[in-house]
């Protein structure tokens, strides 16, 4: 027998302290009621949350679509307006004057070429020499050096 | 020889089926668990609080918490150990909040005590306390229990009153078996002093 056996036997008498025989049934019943109430409360909360999220989904969906479309439009504009020096533009890069690709250029007629060749700039003058030269030419003067015009005036 | 420790309990959990059904939302299965464990957990909480109203309220909270936490129960221990751990922790928290104020509200002592050999021995002819009043004895036992620290009261409740093994108590409390034995030793020594007059 251990030193504490008598005290253990004494303490074990507390096993005879028992709740009423109906306690377990009553307890389980009240626990069920509490549990069901919690479940209902949770499902009501869940329903409210679902409605709130659905409402905000409906509210925000067109706005998001519009924002997305605006973003795409801005991106497209930025690509189109990007400077040609950055390469990859829609403009043709021919090393000289840049003409937008697809621009129609009418062919130069012979008459336009003739007029160009007769222009005062082509002849190196800046004033009324053309008239004087023409006069000189009319007067069988020599053509300017390096030029031979086969046009008849 | 390599011994691989498994996290799962060595013996199959007798409550496994009920637990799994409860985890899948079967409230009736959980009701069965409540019905099964209410008497045991009532004894645990009651003997730690010595107040039957507090015990009923606390037991509701314990089962409600267990139900909410059941999804996280992974079966690394038996359900028995798990729910006992919840009960002990919640009762200790309750006692800390309650503080030193203790109002005894005791259950009736059942008639079976009259046939209990220990009680018969206590009230036998050679004992000077043979005319001991059962209710007086009950009051003194509860007062002595309330004088113990909460840790000591817990091991006395689990070992002496509820009859759990040292190994099970160590799992429930998360301490070594040595700690359980040590706490029991000091608790018994204190109780000897408090209940000296009832000892032969």
Image: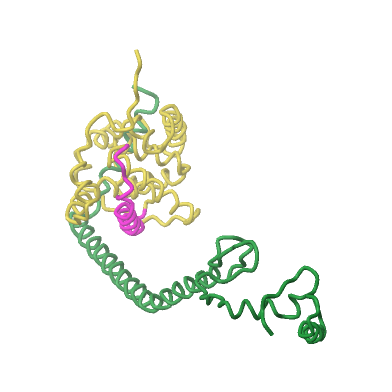
Chain colours: A green, B yellow
Tell me which segment is drawn in magenta: B51-76
Asked if A91 appears above or below B178 in the picture, the reply is: below
Indicate the position of residue B192 as horizontal and vertical percent values.
Answer: 43, 34
Q: Residue at x 78, y 81 (%)?
A: A140
Indicate the position of residue B99 as horizontal and vertical percent values.
Answer: 50, 54
Q: Quadrant of residue B113?
A: top left
Asked if B63 appears above or below B171 in the picture, the reply is: below
Asked if B60 appears above or below B41 in the picture, the reply is: below
Q: Residue at x 32, y 75 (%)?
A: A51
Asked if B109 appears above or below B159 in the picture, the reply is: below
Tell which of A132 and A65 is nearer to you: A132
Indicate the position of residue A91 as horizontal and vertical percent values.
Answer: 56, 67
Quadrant containing the N terminus of chain B is top left
Quadrant containing the C terminus of chain B is top left
Taking the view exactly as shown, the residue that stands out farthest to the top is B1
Whether residue B141 appears in magenta in the rendering, the answer is no
Q: Quadrant of residue B157?
A: top left
Decide whether the magenta segment is chiefly helix, strand or loop.
helix
The number of numbered badges drawn on the structure is 0
Tell which of B121 and B141 is nearer to you: B141
Whether residue B67 appears in magenta in the rendering, the answer is yes
């Amino acid at each position: 027998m251990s030193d504490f056996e008598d005290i253990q036997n004494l303490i074990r008498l507390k096993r005879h302290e028992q709740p009423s025989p109906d306690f377990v049934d009553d307890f389980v019943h009240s626990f069920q009621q509490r549990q069901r109430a919690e479940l209902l409360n949770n499902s009501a909360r869940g329903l409210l949350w679902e409605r709130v999220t659905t409402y905000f989904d409906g509210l925000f969906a067109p706005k998001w679509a519009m924002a997305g479309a605006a973003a795409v439009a801005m991106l497209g504009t930025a690509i189109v307006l990007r400077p040609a020096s950055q390469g990859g533009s829609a403009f043709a890069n021919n090393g000289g004057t840049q003409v937008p690709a697809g621009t129609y250029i009418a062919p130069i007629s012979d008459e336009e070429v003739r007029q160009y060749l007769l222009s005062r700039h082509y002849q190196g003058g800046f004033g009324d020499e053309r008239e004087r030269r023409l006069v000189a030419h009319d007067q069988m003067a020599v053509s300017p050096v390096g030029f031979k015009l086969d046009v008849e005036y | 020889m390599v011994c691989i420790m498994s996290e799962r309990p060595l013996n199959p959990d007798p409550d496994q089926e009920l637990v799994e059904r409860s985890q899948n939302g079967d409230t009736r299965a959980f009701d069965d668990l409540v019905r099964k464990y209410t008497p045991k957990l009532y004894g645990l909480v009651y003997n730690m609080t010595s107040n039957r109203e507090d015990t009923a309220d606390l037991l509701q909270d314990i089962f409600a918490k267990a139900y909410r936490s059941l999804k996280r129960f992974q079966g690394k221990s038996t359900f028995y150990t798990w729910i006992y751990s919840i009960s002990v922790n919640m009762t200790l928290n309750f006692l800390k909040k309650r503080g030193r104020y203790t109002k005894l509200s005791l259950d009736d002592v059942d008639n079976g005590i009259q046939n209990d050999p220990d009680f018969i021995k206590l009230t036998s002819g050679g004992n000077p306390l043979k005319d001991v009043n059962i209710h007086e004895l009950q009051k003194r036992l509860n007062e002595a229990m309330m004088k113990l620290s909460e840790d000591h009261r817990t091991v006395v409740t689990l070992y002496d009153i509820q009859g759990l093994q040292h190994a099970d108590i160590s799992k429930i409390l998360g301490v070594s078996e040595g700690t359980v034995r040590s706490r029991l030793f000091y608790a018994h020594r204190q109780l000897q002093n408090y209940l000296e007059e009832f000892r032969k």
